[in-house]
Amino acid sequence: MSPLKIGLTGSIGMGKTTAARMFAEAGLPVWDADAAVHRLYAPDGAAVPEIARIRPQAVGPDGVSRDALKQWIAEDPTALAQIEAVVHPLVAADREAFLARADAPAVVFDVPLLFETGADAGMDLTVVVSTDPETQKARVMVRPGMTEAQFATILGKQMPDADKRERADVVIHSDTLDTARAGVKDVLRRVRGGGDA
């Protein structure tokens, strides 16, 4: 039987990474979309030959340069679509391979842009991690090199938190570690049919 697919998401600074770690500690396999892209961009990654074909100057001895891709996107309005045409199918294949290997009643897909990319359609349960805007901003602004402008740009690319909460099957409140842990346990109880988490 195929595992239950849990889509986990949340805007920047909401505590999604912490919740993903809690699911992993509870024994559920967690697939991380960002980590998958890092693997694809590594020197031996599957995206390297394809990116080299469409943008040779974005590839070097360390694999695909994210900075070079950002620069290309800033210069060329067609760049993002070209990059996504390469990366999205490879990410989907990585996700499917992970699911095929998983030996658990449920798996967690940690996807920052779950709703924005339509990936929620392939999930059995969608979970959004959320907190109030003040806590979110405080968490993000202590990250090294983060500026108000960068934070605003990132938020502008993400679906508003209220919309995500409305579309989610479950909302985990990450105001504190305890509330986050309680939310994760609640999801685990649902997955495991009401047993102890």
Image: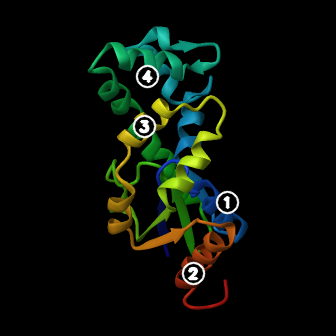
Residue at horizontal 55 percent and vertical 19 percent from the top? 65
Precedes in sequence: disc 1 or disc 2: 1
Mark pair 2, 3: CA separation: 32 Å
Secondary structure of the residue carrying numbered label 4: helix
Mark pair 2, 4: CA separation: 42 Å
Mark 2 is surrounded, within 10 Å at the Cα level, by few (under 14), some (14 to 19) or many (20 or more) other residues, namely some
Q: Which residue is tagged 1? A: 21
Whether the residues at callouts 3 and 1 have beta carbons within 8 Å, the answer is no
Mark pair 1, 2: CA separation: 15 Å
Secondary structure of the residue carrying numbered label 3: helix
Mark pair 3, 1: CA separation: 26 Å
Q: Residue furthest front?
A: 134
Q: Which residue is tagged 2? A: 186
Question: x, y (%) of residue 168?
Answer: 38, 68
Precedes in sequence: disc 3 or disc 4: 4
Query: Is residue 24 positioned above or below 181 on the image?
Result: above
Nearest to viewer (mark 2 / mark 3): 3
Does residue 172 appear to the left or right of 79 in the view shown?
A: right
Q: Amino acid at mark 1?
A: Arg
Mark 4 is surrounded, within 10 Å at the Cα level, by few (under 14), some (14 to 19) or many (20 or more) other residues, namely some
Residue at horizontal 60 percent and vertical 63 percent from the top? 102
Whether the residues at callouts 2 and 4 have beta carbons within 8 Å, the answer is no
Precedes in sequence: disc 3 or disc 1: 1
Secondary structure of the residue carrying numbered label 2: helix
Mark pair 3, 4: CA separation: 32 Å
Query: Is residue 53 positioned above or below 28 on the image?
Result: above
Secondary structure of the residue carrying numbered label 1: helix
Q: Which residue is tagged 4? A: 50
Q: Which residue is tagged 3? A: 152
